[in-house]
Every structure is written in C-alpha cells, then in structure tokens.
Image (cartoon, rainbow, N blue to C red):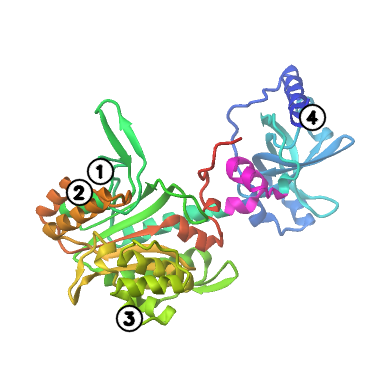
C-alpha cells in the first residue's frame, strides 16, 4: 500500500471514530460571526492585559493548516480565506464530545470554533476555544511541503491545493476580482452600458484567429466559440446604444504560452461619435487610475523593471518604430525584396513566399515589440492587417488604429471603426480569399453584419483590452497561468 493510500485509510478510520462518538463528519450549517483577518486587524495589536480585561468573544471557521498536541491541550491554526489565526484547544474548556473531535483532527480538516481572544505565554494572538464544531473531514493529506508548494504541475492542475498551500495566490485572485470590478465601475460611471453577447457564433469574426468548432444538434449546424464579441457589440451601436462594453471569455484554437491561454478574458467597449484618439486618453486614464486605486501607486515593478503608468504615454507610429529600432531605410517598408533581405539580416523568421506586409509585420513583432517596456501606443497600422479599422484620411493605406504595449507585450487593441458597408464588404472578401488560400485565421464574409452596417452606424471607436495580461502586470506574474484559476493543460498522465 503506498503512503498516500495508507494515510487516506487512517483518515477514514478517524472518520468512523467521529461517527461512533455521535459527531457528523460532514456538518451542516455553521454561523460564522467573525473573520480571522478582521479580528487581527481590530485586536491583533492589543496587549495580553487588555485582551484579558475586554474578553472579546468570537466565532470563526476554517481549515486546519497547523496542529500541535501536548497532553490534554493543543494548538491549531485555522485558515479562513482572509488570514490565519491560532486557536487553543484545552480539554478542561471543551465538552467531552468536542474534545473527542480534537483527538481525531488532521491537517486539512474544517472546524468551527467559538471562544475569546487572548495571548499565550509566548504572546501569540489566539482564540481560547470554548465550543468546537466539526465541519468536514479531509480524506487526503495536504502535500508534504504544502506550506511552500512549488510544483508547477500540481499548482495549475490542482488549483484548490495551490490556494491552500500558498496564501499569496489568494491575494492574486482577490486582486484580479478588484481589477475587474474597478474596470466595470470606471466604465459605468462614464455612461457605458454593460451587455452580454453570444458565445456561440454562426460565423467566427472580430479578430484574426482560428476558432473552436462545435455542433448544435437541434439546429443541425456547426457553431464557433467566439474569438471576439466585436461584431455583435457594433450591431448594438447600430441599434442605438451609444456606449457599450462587455467583460467575458474569448476562445482561440491557438498555441499555449506564458501569455496565451485558449480561453481568456477580454474587455471590449465601443463609443459612438468618437475616434481612436479619444480612446488613447480614456485608456491612459483607466489603467493609471486602476493602478492608483488597486496598488496605491502608478510606478510599479514588473519582473525586475520599473514601469511608469502615469500618463501621458508614448505615441509611436507602426512604420516609424520599425525604421528607428532597426535603423532601416524607409524603402524597406514598400519593397518586398528589400524587406525580405532586412528580415534575414535581422534573423527574423520569415518564408520566402511571405507577402510584404507579413514580412514587415514579422520584423515588427520580433524586433520592436520586445523593446516596448514602458507604456507605448503603436499607431497607424497598414490596412492589410486591420480589416475592421477605418482608413486614415491623410493616408488611405493606413488605418486609425493603435495597439498598446506594456512590458513587451500587447495589452490593448483599438481603432476608429470602419462604418462604410461597401468598404467593409471589400475587406471581408479580401480576407475570404486569404482563407481560401490557406489562412485559417482570416475572416469570413459576415452577411448579417454587413446588413447591419447598411442600416447605418455612426462614427465609432472601439477597443479590446486583455484582462489576463493586465492582471499579470498588476500582480507581477510572468505567466498567464498564474492569473487564470484553471488554465488549460495537457491531459493528466
């Protein structure tokens, strides 16, 4: 019998002992009146004498994460999600049944206790337990070194164990929740309406990505998990909602990396009568105010580097950034032969049959993006890689678009929306031709979206922000898996 199975069998025996003593090992309701974190905040600095005088009552519940027994007394540490607090279990203070419970306790069990706050002989802030209720028996032991669990496979695959073992992980996901709530409040305060759009689309669109495919039996049709909500949100702009946003999941059938997960959380928002310049200002304000609200500062540290989030942030055109970073002749951007030669000279992986725009974009991704550590808006993207963005009035070969980069990765993508249905049809058809040629990420022609545009969409600006990457930045995490509660993994062996 292996060690894990042996420990499990021992715990099952203890479970039987509890039942024989009349104790329900999987209890029902327990009224929690206090939280460990708040008790520590309110009373944790009080002296032994003050606590003895005030006799502060409390009732808490939590998981046993430490246990020490000696004679007819012992100490346990309870973890309740807000903090950890020591409790004192003494036979003379408990009923016979309650003391029986203490004898059957294991690390990982859940109990509820009622008592008074005091300080031990070693001056440790503690609950002196007068009543004890058993709530749930853990049949599996915590990992041997649970208090410092570092095994990545276990942490991601068994997030529940990670949350038990590493209190700082709790803090990451509490911060994640506060960031999302802060974004929601920021937009609602500025007149945005939060909406929900379909997760299953008849035609994938709104981004260049390979979709997941599913099948609806009753309708007898294939559907696609959405890669972006963009085209539905713009339908709502057509319908007369001037400001809309959605925070929800997107799904892309692509590779997995430290910054990519097949399902991820996106914020998308659209503003009528605005352009991408308005969104630059709004984005600066949103991110910097969130940093101040959540972290109390706008200069943060990310992976050993200080990043300043206080606006204004750098604006840098797409083509100019490529030229300046690599010290290239501007002619490279319009001559495929020169672009291919430049890519090879810079050790940028490209194929000899790649288009000019794909070669130039590969140079940008390999040489410019990693250098964009401080917040930078890259603007004026070519129309060939911006199928949904409005043409730039001063140069129709470019678009009114920006991407925001921080710490060398894309955080946001925005543009003045294309609202010309005839131009949009041409671009969709161009994308469809690319798809026929083998590009699985190119758009299909969405006839219903084109029909919506033909009813008239006002000038509109739209933006998408990668919530997971923003949370990575705010919590100083190098991998997206550390900010997603249940990341996708290969099947367990």
Q: Give the structural element (helix, strand or loop) at label 3.
A: helix
> Along the line of sight, which residue is nearer the eye, 222 or 40?
222
Instruction: Point out the tag, 3 or 4, that comes first from the N-terminus.
Output: 4
Q: Mark 3 and 1 residues: CB-CB less than 8 Å, in contact?
A: no
Say which residue appears at 26% left-offset and 25% top-offset.
Answer: 218
Instruction: Point out the tag, 2 or 1, that comes first from the N-terminus.
Output: 1
> Along the line of sight, which residue is nearer the eye, 209 or 251?
209
| Label 2 crowd (10 A; few <14 / some 14-19 / many >=20) | many
Residue under numbered circle 2: 445
Camera sees residue 80: no
- The answer for how far apart the CA atoms under marks 2 and 4 are is 71 Å
Name the mark on residue 467.
Answer: none
Q: Is residue 171 above or below residue 79?
A: below
Say whether residue 166 is magenta: yes
Mark in front: 2 vs 4: 2
Q: Going by the image, does 484 lie left or right of 119?
A: left
Say whether residue 293 is magenta: no
Residue under numbered circle 1: 203
Q: Mark 3 and 2 residues: CB-CB less than 8 Å, in contact?
A: no
């Amino acid at each position: 019998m292996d060690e894990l199975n042996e420990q499990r069998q021992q715990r099952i025996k203890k479970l039987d002992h509890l039942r024989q003593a009349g104790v329900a090992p999987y209890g029902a309701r327990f009224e929690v009146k206090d939280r460990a974190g708040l008790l520590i905040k309110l009373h944790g600095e009080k002296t032994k004498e003050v606590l003895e005088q005030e006799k502060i009552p409390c009732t808490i519940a939590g998981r046993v994460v430490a246990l020490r027994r000696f004679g007819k007394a012992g100490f346990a540490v309870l973890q309740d999600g807000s903090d950890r607090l020591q409790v004192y279990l003494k036979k003379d203070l408990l009923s016979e049944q309650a003391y029986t419970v203490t004898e059957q306790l294991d690390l990982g069990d859940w109990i509820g206790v009622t008592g008074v706050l005091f300080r031990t002989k070693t001056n440790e802030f503690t609950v002196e337990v007068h009543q004890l209720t058993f709530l749930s028996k853990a049949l599996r032991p915590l990992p041997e070194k649970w208090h410092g669990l570092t095994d990545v496979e276990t942490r991601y695959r068994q997030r529940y164990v990670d949350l038990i073992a590493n209190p700082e992980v709790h803090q990451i996901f509490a911060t994640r929740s506060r960031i999302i709530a802060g974004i929601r409040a920021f937009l609602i305060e500025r007149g945005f309406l939060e909406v929900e759009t379909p997760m299953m689309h008849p035609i994938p669109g709104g981004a260049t990505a390979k979709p997941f495919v599913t099948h609806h039996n009753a309708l007898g049709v294939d559907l696609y998990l959405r890669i972006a909500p963009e085209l539905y949100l713009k339908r709502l702009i057509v319908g007369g909602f001037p400001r809309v946003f959605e925070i929800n999941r997107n799904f892309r059938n692509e590779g997995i990396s430290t910054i990519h997960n097949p399902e991820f959380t996106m914020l998308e928002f659209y503003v009528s009568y605005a352009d991408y310049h308005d969104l630059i200002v709004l984005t600066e304000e949103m991110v910097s105010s969130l940093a101040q609200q959540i972290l109390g500062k706008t200069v943060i540290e990310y992976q050993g580097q200080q990043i300043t989030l206080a606006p204004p942030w750098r604006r840098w055109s797409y083509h100019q950034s490529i030229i300046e970073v690599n010290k290239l002749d501007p002619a490279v951007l319009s001559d495929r032969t020169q672009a291919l030669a430049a890519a090879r000279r810079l050790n940028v992986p490209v194929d000899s049959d790649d288009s000019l725009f794909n070669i130039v974009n590969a140079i940008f991704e390999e040489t410019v993006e990693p250098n964009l550590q401080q917040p930078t808006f890259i603007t004026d993207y070519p129309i060939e890689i911006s199928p949904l963005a409005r043409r730039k009035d001063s140069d129709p070969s470019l678009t009114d678009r920006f991407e925001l980069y921080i710490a060398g990765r894309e955080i946001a993508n925005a543009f003045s929306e294309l609202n010309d249905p005839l131009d949009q049809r041409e671009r969709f058809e161009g994308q469809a031709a690319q798809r026929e040629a083998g590009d699985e990420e190119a758009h299909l022609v969405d006839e219903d979206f084109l029909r919506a545009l033909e009813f008239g969409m006002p000038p509109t600006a739209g933006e998408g922000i990668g919530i997971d990457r923003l949370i990575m930045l705010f919590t100083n995490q190098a991998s997206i898996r550390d900010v997603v509660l249940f990341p996708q993994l290969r099947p367990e062996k």
